[in-house]
Image (cartoon, coloured by chain):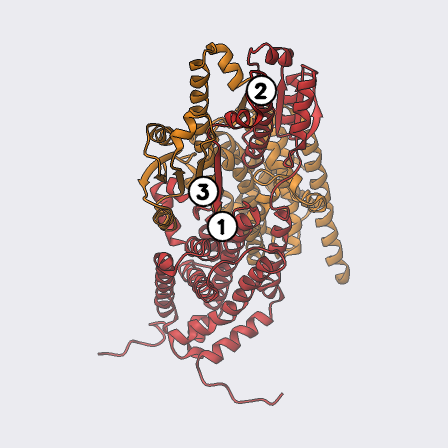
Chain colours: A orange, B red
Amino acid sequence: MIAAFFREIVAALNAIWADKGARSTMLGATLFFSVFFPQPYLSEVVRDMPVAVIDQDGSTLSREVIRRIDAADAVAVARYAADMPSARALFLKREVHGIVVVPPKFEQDLLAGRAAPLATFSDGGYFLLNSVMSSALSNAARSLGAEVQVGRLTASGVDMTQAMAIVEPLRVTAVPLFNPTGGYASFVLPAVFVLILQQTLLMGIGNLKAGRRPAGPLSTLADTVVYVGLYALWAGVVLVLLPWVYRLPRIGDIAVMYAVVVPFLFAVTAMGFAVARLIPTREGVIFFLVVLGMPLFFLSGVSWPTEAMPELLHVLSLAIPSTTAVPALVRVNQMGADIQSVETTILVQIGLCLAYSALALLVDWVKAKPAA
Amino acid sequence: MVRRPHLKAGFRRVFLAELRQIGARPGLMFMLAPFPLLLFALLAVVFQLGLPRDLPIVVVDQDRSTLSRQMVRVVDATPEVMVAYKAGTLADGRLLLLSGKAYAVVLIPSRTERDVLAGRRPEVVLFYNNQYMTPGSLVARSVGGALGTVAAGISIEARVARGADVESATQAVTPIPVRQSALFNPSLEYVQFLLAAVMPTVLQIFIGASAALSFSRDRQGIAGLGRSLRLGGTLLRTASGKFAPYTFAYLLVLWGADALLFGPMGARFGGSLAFHIAYGLVFVLASQMLGAAAALLARDTVSALAAVGVITGPAFGFTGITFPRLSMNGFSDVWANLLPVTHYLELRTDNILRGAPLDISLPAFGWLVVLALAYGAATLLLLWRHGRPRPAAVPEPAR
């Protein structure tokens, strides 16, 4: 019995190696995607986004506020424009991604204690550039405004401490957790890597099993052990080694990670068997999985909050292992969550594994009946 | 139906042969229009809110004063955020973050109100989950804004107490107000931002993959590509006859999705419709040529599909919609230029969102045309190479 099982294990390994499609998805594609996919994000943050300035005041303070905007890491004052139409033309040509207008009498109003507004135009078509613009501007405006106010109060005879207490009676400090620099690679990649594991495993199983007659229980068990074992190794590579190579924050406990990864891989394998039985051709399975990658990423709630999705859609999306596994693994690896924080996910994965196994058996049974 | 003699070799004959091929495969028919439209519906439902609302956060109120309760009220009143949990300690709040139940913790330390009154400038801390960047930064912005309002109120009161009038005290609180307006997409709707960009990217996968399937299948068939070439007569007629059914189907999907987006979903269309139709057509053609060229390079159908998957699957990251192209490394910038969808999305942004004059869009349109021509030329070349009669069967005529 044990010897037979080992023969099946060897057979399963040989099958992966012998099938070109399976070999390239389960061995090649996993690594290829994890190197290729991160490329656009590797610089992590936007630096020196060019902006145009229209300085209609030309005063010491207007130059000071422009200097402070330029001093922000994320933006750089690239062009001075004479008026709005010429600034807008630069914007349309994508030579600048934001426009700052310092109105006339900026300094005069500011020193007289009247509101001296800055007008800024940012790009609503690109959200990251939009938020880069808004934080650079509000930081510069707030720091200069507070200094001018404190200066006015101290000049009128208020002592420094009291002046500070009037200008800023309550300090509000925002502390970003887990991804302190707001890096885009640190945000996207940990989630995408989990999805790559799921999609390539499903494709590999599709390559090996779609359109074939279902094998016996011993052989299926051996296949499962081989797939889960192989992908447990891949999980180590893409979830531990690659984050280290790319310098992404990773603070999680590896044991907790595997407590999620192993049931996740079982669920994906069971789903792979079910999909391979439902879609009869290898081409069909691969087509289906390739186009589904991006929608599945959005369903995981890492980039678009699940709270903003309709409840029904969220419940339906739980049928895909990645929907809960992606955020759970991000919480473990990047946020240092312990096993209690992800136990729901582990239970969901076990449930999915059982459900997809049952579905695969049901399809076998339905297909076998007419023949009997 | 009357049996007619065989059609003359040419575009129509290849076109009809391809239609029959599609008709014989219900799976392929499903891939042509219903499946992409279903995915569009799915994504539309995902982003239906346009902007997230009532994101759950935790408040750790250790002060329990009038002021701290006011802060909680103001924070809770912002539309984006909901105070879903009140925790006694920061550790409890942290657990809620780690289990994914909340996006941020607001800590109001004890004696906050007393210290404010004594002018000791106490600190209220907002810890937000920046690993989930979209909701995290949204929460940070709205909670920060709400707490800023509370602080401003106190500041105004202090100034009024010192004898200032309310008007000037209010102005003094924010001496340099920033009036930010987003040029184009001013409401910052995610529907415009993501849905309109994700759909063409997904469609590029469909278009490339179906072209790959079509050419690969002919090549793997017993008769090989030679048969398709005989049906078409010339290379160009064969290729266009094979492409045409898919071009029609995917243009219908592309424009059908746009019709939904700009019709019932209420997105604004601010540009030239004729131009929109033109670059849509070139985009579909370029994506088809890309898939066909990949299919003719790859050894078998599965590798052809895998190649298309590798090229078009990760395309979204390269288009610069989420992470901007100006911050990408050199490789990504070059790769992005080789993808039809990059230029298509840029043209869409220019035309629909920005209403830019045509001369602004010429470089991107030029790129799209060049890509279509280059991939098309590669397809024809490979078609000629693989489709010519085998030298063993037909010896080359002596020159």
* Subunit ID for the residue under disc 3: A
Q: Give the percent coordinates (x, y) of residue B62.
A: 67, 15
Q: Which residue is mark 3?
A: A122
Compared with residue B137, is residue B260 higher up or lower down, i.e. above or below?
Answer: below
Q: Residue at x 42, y 30 (%)?
A: A109
Task: Give the mark toward the camera: 2 or 3.
Answer: 2
Compared with residue B236, is residue B113 higher up or lower down, i.e. above or below?
Answer: above
Q: Is residue A253 visible?
A: no
Q: Which residue is mark 1?
A: B313
Q: Give the percent coordinates (x, y) of residue B226.
A: 42, 73
Front residue (pair A259, A325): A325
Same subunit: marks 2 and 3:
no
* Subunit ID for the residue under disc 2: B
Q: What quarter of the picture does the C terminus of chain A occupy?
A: bottom right
What's the CA distance linking mark 1 and mark 3? Answer: 30 Å
Disc 2 secondary structure class = helix
Q: What quarter of the picture does the N terminus of chain A occupy?
A: top right
Image marks 2 and 1: residues in contact by CB distance under 8 Å: no
